[in-house]
Image (tube, rainbow, N blue to C red):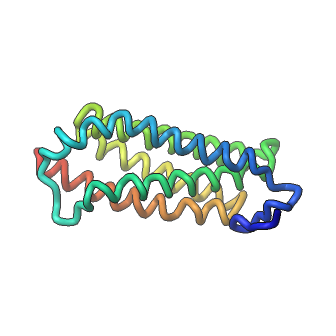
Amino acid sequence: MKFQILNFKCSDKNFNIKKFILWILVCELVGVAGSVFTVPAIGGWYASLAKPFFNPPNWIFAPVWNLLFVMMGIAIYYVLQEGWGQGRVRRAAVFFWAQLALNLLWSALFFGLRSPRSAFIEIIGLWLAIFVTISAFWSVSKTAALLMVPYLLWVSFASFLNLAIWQLNS
């Protein structure tokens, strides 16, 4: 079987399909955990909020986040394939797990606690953590770093959206 996923061929001896899928699933599970806070709030509390003109329709969020979590899973796979024994790999992985935890925390603050203010303060930290993760990934795998850029761009947009919702509802 020969097909290529980014620059890994599934026939390459270094490609491990089980680990590849595992890391994607781990990242997707963080998204599922975040949806525990999000889904119950969408039809009620979130629907009642004033939103800015640039607020996308609700249906767009799930596919965008699913794609971003897949890309995160692929990115961490690339980094970990370089070998846990290297300090730069361990450091990059720690930053990655920290930003993933902050991602989940944002959902808990915004939707769970219904606090756009707290979520906005937290999303600034999330943005910084993603930026640091990309920087750490760059020294290990440029492909992994580039896979994280759309996530940083989406969180940049989400930060402005979060700020606008907070301001419109204060």
Please tell me which residue is depicted at 26% across the width and 51% down the height of the picture.
162
Q: Which percent across, then down, holds residue 16?
A: 79, 50
Q: Which percent across, then down, holds residue 79?
A: 71, 52
Mark count: 0
Q: Quadrant of residue 52?
A: bottom left
In the depicted view, which residue is nearer to us: 51 or 120? Answer: 51
Figure check: 95 above or below 109: below
Q: Is residue 5 left or right of residue 116?
A: right
Q: Which percent across, then down, holds residue 81?
A: 77, 51
Q: Is residue 116 left or right of residue 8?
A: left
Please tell me which residue is depicted at 34% across the width and 61% down the height of the picture.
157
In the depicted view, which residue is nearer to us: 48 or 125? Answer: 48
Work out which quarter of the rendered image holds the C terminus and state it.
top left
Work out which quarter of the rendered image holds the N terminus and state it.
bottom right
Q: Residue furthest right?
A: 13
Please tell me which residue is depicted at 12% across the width and 52% down the height of the picture.
50
Please tell me which residue is depicted at 32% across the width and 55% down the height of the picture.
159
Q: Which percent across, then down, holds residue 66?
A: 47, 52
In the depicted view, which residue is nearer to us: 41 or 128? Answer: 41
In the depicted view, which residue is nearer to us: 59 or 73? Answer: 59
Figure check: 94 above or below 82: above
